[in-house]
Image: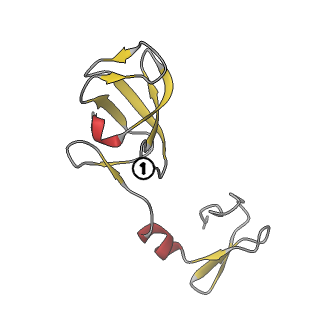
Amino acid sequence: MSHPPCPNCQSEYVYPDQNHLVCPECAYEWNPVEELENRFTVKDANGTLLEEGDKVTLAKDLKVKGSSLVLKIGTKAVVRRIVEGKDHQLDCKVDGAGEMMVTAMFVKKA
């Protein structure tokens, strides 16, 4: 049976101790059930839950800060990472523009 990596140091050498998991490298202990319940979630413009690896399309034209580039509605992107932030929640690879952070309320799940 495999266990998830340590959320503190990403070590793969995790072992169970009753209903907790323990990391021997950084001594971090956590309950995996609580970890899943406290997980940060992000929803798109339609209220659909987004996850890492999802394919999305832009729901409106977006100006890129510090550039004259405008990303048009319908531009496709892949969600690389979901980060907890007040401005931008999605770290995406956008077709024709490369890697950039996008606000979740401006995309729709494809």
Residue 29: x and y, percent? 66, 77
Residue in front for this viewpoint, 109 or 83: 83
Residue 44: x and y, percent? 28, 44
The residue at the point 56 percent across, 84 percent down is 19
Position of 46 relative to 13 (above/below): above
Residue in front for this viewpoint, 90 or 23: 90
Q: Amino acid at mark 1?
A: Lys
Give the residue at mark 1: 86
Q: Residue furthest right?
A: 25
Position of 73 relative to 29 (above/below): above
Bin the neighbour count of mark 1 within 10 Å (Cα to Cα): few under 14, some 14-19, many 20 and up: few
Residue in front for this viewpoint, 105 or 55: 105
Q: Is residue 96 left or right of residue 17?
A: left
Q: Residue furthest bottom?
A: 18
The residue at the point 30 percent across, 29 percent down is 57
Q: Quadrant of the N terminus?
A: bottom right
Residue 86: x and y, percent? 42, 49
The residue at the point 69 percent across, 69 percent down is 14
Residue 16, picture quadrant:
bottom right
Q: Is residue 75 left or right of residue 26?
A: left
Q: Residue furthest left?
A: 46
Q: Quadrant of the C terminus?
A: top left
Residue 12: x and y, percent? 70, 60
Q: In the structure shown, which secondary structural element does the residue marked by tag 1 occupy?
A: loop
Number of numbered discs overlaid on the protein picture: 1
